[in-house]
Amino acid sequence: MAESMDFNEMNKNVVAEFRDNGGKVGGVFAGTPLVLVHHVGARSGVKRITPLAYFAEDGRIFVFATKGGADDNPAWYHNLLANPRVTVELGTETFEVVAVPLSGAERDEYFAKQVAVAPHFAEYQRMATRVIPVVELRRVA
């Protein structure tokens, strides 16, 4: 439980720093592009904000359910599957998106692109016994 509380506290600090600095943070996330994803717990109904590393290309935004290479998917991923219409904060902009999991060659393509800019993501995949999901956050018009 203490680890979970420490992780929650870290997320709160990252969210505050993100908002105070126009979407930029330091520490272990220095230089990492981050998006804040507002989502609702699939079972609990609790509103949450999770900072996630993302890859962007041609106005498209992709996030990766690595959970640090764990064998199960992170809670935020299950929450997005249950309630895919969410709000994100990117830099100083806030907007609605629909979370769309990618599959097959498209999933592989964007995971490889993320690995090219953040090689440690390859280690997450090596550690996991599952295929790490890639989710596109598509802007709602």
Image (spheres, rainbow, N blue to C red):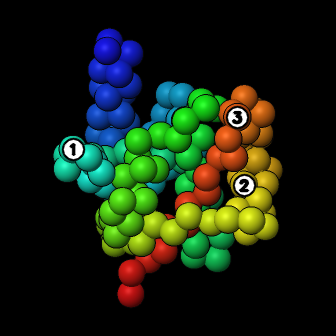
What kind of residue is marked 1?
Ser
Query: Where residue 103 sits in the image (x, y, percent)?
Result: 67, 65
Q: Residue at x 61, y 32 (%)?
A: 71
Residue at position x 54%, y 28% from top?
Answer: 28
- Farthest residue, direction top: 2
- Res. 95 image quadrant: bottom left
Tag 3's secondary structure?
A: loop
* Image coords of residue 41 (percent x, y): 28, 48
- Is label 2 or label 3 in front? 3
Three-letter code for the amino acid on which mark 3 is drawn: Thr
Q: Which mark is residue 111?
A: 2
Q: Is residue 100 visible?
A: yes
Within 10 angstroms of label 2, few (less than 14), some, or many (20 or more) residues?
A: many
Mark before the other along the chain sequence, 3 or 1 = 1
Q: Nearer the viewer, residue 119 or 103?
A: 103
In the rendered image, the quadrant that contains the C terminus is: bottom left
Q: Is residue 117 left or right of residue 21?
A: right
Q: Mark 2 touching mark 3, by CB under 8 A?
A: no
Per the rendering, the mark at residue 129 is 3
Q: Which residue is mark 1?
A: 44
In the rendered image, residue 123, in percent from the top left (x then y), is placed at 75, 32
Amino acid type of disc 2? Phe
Relative image position of residue 57 (x, y in whole percent):
65, 70
Q: Which quadrant: the N terminus?
A: top left
Question: Could you tell me which residue is drawn at 19 percent across and 50 percent down?
Answer: 45
Residue 52 as seen in the image, left or right of residue 14: right
Instruction: Say which of 29 and 66 sits in front.
Output: 66
Image position of 90 with respect to 9: above or below? below
For label 1, the crowd category at 10 Å Cα-Cα, with few meaning under 14, some 14 to 19 and many 20 or more, is few
The local secondary structure at tag 1 comes to loop
